[in-house]
Structure formats: structure tokens, C-alpha cells
Image: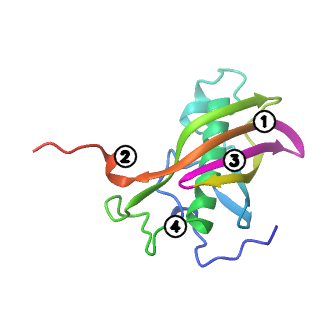
Amino acid sequence: MNSYQHEFENVEDYIHHRPPYLLVEKICAISSTEIVTEKSVSGNESFIKGHFPGAPIFPGAMMQELTTQSAGILIAAQHNPMKEFNTRDPFFNEYALGVLVKVKQARYKGFARPGETLTVHVTLKDQVSNVFDFSAFIKVNGELIMRNSFQLMNIKSSVLQGATTG
């Protein structure tokens, strides 16, 4: 995989998510079919404070979200159908990129705790039209803690935003 070299250096240039829901902190490497990202677990995340008291761990559902956000960044960086793309104006883009439409499989084999860094590896397996098939895994300290596969889809922004009433 090629090292990360792109005109955007800020994760927020690729994805509409914002804190506190933006989980990806760093793009380590990216190519047309793969991305590697990182998330350091501080322990101050709101979802960790109650998961679980006395034994805080990064939730499995948030690991799934971390992989889908990483895949969404790959779509925006390498497979964006729009000539111009703006993550700061939700009404600017014709398409919402990388909307989760299917989780095919997820398997959890370990935990991530405060002070640890999750390293996310996502691979684009196939693309048919606006549907992207991905597989991913997450490691902490070199140990596999999660593996999954899922589909993301580019949809019209108007569908995501819903109908407006007058």
C-alpha cells in the first residue's frame, strides 16, 4: 500500500462526521483499495464511561463504526463520484458517501482499553455501481481484536436528509 499522500491532511476533509461521533483520528496509509487508520482510546469518550464501570472497554458497536468511517474516508478519497466535495456544508454535495447498508459479519476477539490505540485496516473487495463491499480488521498492540465485513453505498444527499415540510 502506498503511504498517505493526498491534498487533504485533516480527517474532517474526507468525512461529514464531527466530534464526538468522529472516531477516526489519523489516516496512516491509503491506496485505491486499502486504508489504515488509528484511534487512540482516551477513556474520556462518553460511551466508555458506562461500558463498563470499573472495567472500561471500547464497545464493539463503536469498533464497527470505526471501520465504516475508515471505509467512508477511502470512498471519499479514492472513489468520489463528485467533481467538487465539501464536508463542511451538508447541503453542498449531491451524494452522501459511504452510508452503511449491510453488516455481513462481525467477530470480536479482544478488547481495547483506555491508553491503547486501535489500528484499523480496511480493504475494498468489490464495487458494483454505488455499492462497496469491504472487509476490515482492528488490532491493538499487534493483536487482532475484531474482524468484519460490510457494505457501504453512495446515496443521494436528499434521501439522507429526508423530505422537508413546508
Judge the density around disc 3: few (<14), some (14-19), many (≥20) Cα neighbours within 10 Å.
many
Separation of residues labelled 1 and 4 (CA atoms)? 27 Å
For the question of whether residue 48 can be seen, the reply is yes
Pointer 1 and pointer 4: residues touching (CB < 8 Å)? no
Separation of residues labelled 1 and 3 (CA atoms)? 14 Å
Q: Residue furthest top?
A: 53
- Mark 2 vs mark 1: in front: 2
Q: Which residue is mark 3?
A: 134
Residue 89 percent coordinates (x, y) = 35, 63
Q: Amino acid at mark 2?
A: Leu
User: What residue do we see at 69% from left, 47% from top?
Assistant: 134
User: What residue do we see at 59% from left, 65% from top?
Assistant: 79
The N terminus: image quadrant: bottom right
Pointer 1 and pointer 3: residues touching (CB < 8 Å)? no
Depth order, front residue of 108/34: 34
- The residue range painted magenta reads 129-147
Pointer 3 and pointer 2: residues touching (CB < 8 Å)? no
Q: Which residue is mark 4?
A: 13
Helix or strand or loop: what does disc 2 sit on?
helix
Q: Which of marks 4 and 2 precedes in the sequence?
A: 4
* Left or right side of 72 for 42: right
Residue 41 percent coordinates (x, y) = 69, 43
Q: Residue furthest front?
A: 128
Does residue 135 show up magenta in the picture?
A: yes
Q: Amino acid at mark 4?
A: Asp
Residue 103 percent coordinates (x, y) = 63, 34
User: What residue do we see at 65% from left, 20% from top?
Assistant: 53
- Mark 2 vs mark 4: in front: 2
Separation of residues labelled 3 and 4 (CA atoms)? 21 Å
Q: Which residue is mark 1?
A: 146
Identify the disc placed on residue 160: 2
Depth order, front residue of 110/41: 110
